Image (tube, helix red, strand yellow):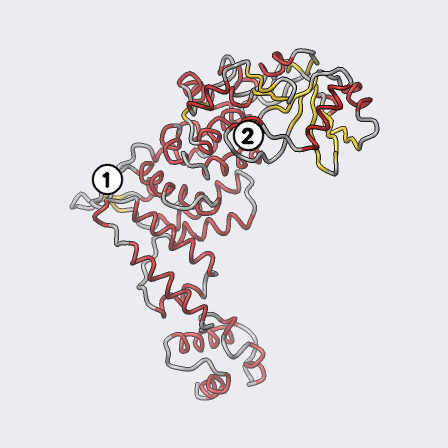
Amino acid sequence: MYLPEEVKKVISMLEEAGFEAYAVGGCVRDSLLGKTPGDYDVTTSAKPEEMKEVFKNEHVIETGIKHGTLTVLINKIPIETTTFRVDIDYSDNRHPSRVEFTRSLREDLARRDFTVNALAYSEKTGIIDVFGGIPDLEHGIIRCVGNPDERFGEDALRIMRGLRFASVLGFEIEKETADSIERNGSLLKNVSAERLSSELIKFLCGKNAPELLVEHVGTISVLIPELAVLKGFEQHHFRHDRDVLGHTAAVLANVPPKPVLRLAALFHDIAKPRCFSIGEDGIGHFYGHPILGAEMAEDILTRLKFDNETKKSVCELVRRHGDKFPAEPKAIKRLLGKIDKKAFDDLICLMRADDLGKRAEYFPGEDFFESYRKIAADIIEKEECFSLKNLAVSGADLIKAGVEPGPEMGRILDELLEKVIEGEQPNEKEALMELLKKR
């Protein structure tokens, strides 16, 4: 296993001082999976005061000294280094009330969440696997260390972490662990919205998110109760062969793993149960569900403490995902005047995924969606006019021509823009000002 020189130095300094020290957790897991770890953590038998003595000539930050954690900066690279410990009394299902330091690596590994994260390594010892993490990595399994009910009761965030690891790594969740996730899902109410939203995004962007959403919607509904009713909600429409949850999962599977797109896919039909009606012919309808869905998505994202930019982007996609417009320049110019090119591309991507989530015979084909992209790209490449920003006249020009600032000015500019988009008038200042005189 490869270790950066900075990590090797931290471990060797501790070993030379007579202590055990190992790279631990996710960095070992990722290395065994052939991935480059994002960071490296070190665990050691040295107690905090002993670590401070070992690293007295290095830059040390007392990150979490109470819990035995110091951050050692080697070549300006931070290496988080923590004393072997046992966590005691998780009274809030999130944080230990106190920790006890130990000289036992096994006791330290026993407190960790999943077997694939309870791995340690040093060049002196090789990989140390006490709880079967390596076989679970080889077989693609997420399994709790010890009793899953105890692990999730200690720290409820581990429930979402388990789902996230299974999603991102493409692993299966071992049955006892999966059953415990469902039993203990309500404990997620004790976790902050910020931590939950962070795990949710990682989960949604994982390769196994669609399957896990369906399988564990009960647990995920603790975060987003609005999802629960989607399960088993039949659409009673000839274009659909899945319930709303199954369709949502299919859409999720057919958009790229970008946070905004995955969130939009998750929420695009969330209002369908509230908008459902059935016609005399037995066909189901969901009138107004995109607009109500955007309102619901905004409420959910606000509740989960997402930033305003994400909320705006997701809600715009949800609101417009059911729009119907021809693949011709005029219609696409009008849309590009309302949303930017990135949002346009995301919308086409979501619309394509939405159609892929329906019965196969109703998919209009890849060329249908590619035509939208080509027309939009051509409009932008040629710098054609599609918004007030690239209209040849501005509000200042209208003021010079005697138009009073206010709503009337806005209406005039919109009229001029429409004339240009329709091809009735070239986007030239002189011609547009001449047209203004004739109004």
User: What number is the disc on residue 86?
Assistant: none
Residue position for label 1? 241
Residue 323 appears left or right of 64:
left
Q: CA distance from mark 2 to mark 1?
A: 42 Å
**Residue 86: percent from left, percent from top:** 65, 14
Taking depth in this image into account, of 132 and 247 the one nearest to the observer is 132
Crowding near pointer 2: few (<14 within 10 Å), some, many (20+)? Answer: some
Mark in front: 2 vs 1: 2
**Residue 44: percent from left, percent from top:** 69, 19
Crowding near pointer 1: few (<14 within 10 Å), some, many (20+)? Answer: some
Q: Secondary structure at mark 2?
A: helix
Q: How many marks?
A: 2
In this rendering, is residue 310 above or below 371? Answer: above
Q: Give the residue furthest to the front.
A: 124
User: What number is the disc on residue 31?
Assistant: 2
Taking depth in this image into account, of 375 and 131 the one nearest to the observer is 131
In this rendering, is residue 327 above or below 362? Answer: below
Location of the N terminus (image quadrant): top right
Give the mark, 2 or 1, whose residue is nearer the N terminus. Answer: 2
Location of the C terminus (image quadrant): bottom left
Q: Residue sitting at 20 percent across and 46 percent down?
A: 279
Taking depth in this image into account, of 372 and 313 the one nearest to the observer is 372
**Residue 147: percent from left, percent from top:** 50, 12
Q: Amino acid at mark 1?
A: Asp
Q: Amino acid at mark 2?
A: Ser
Residue 126 appears left or right of 149:
right
Q: Residue sitting at 61 percent across and 12 percent down?
A: 106
**Residue 259: percent from left, percent from top:** 48, 44
In this rendering, is residue 228 above or below 422? Answer: above
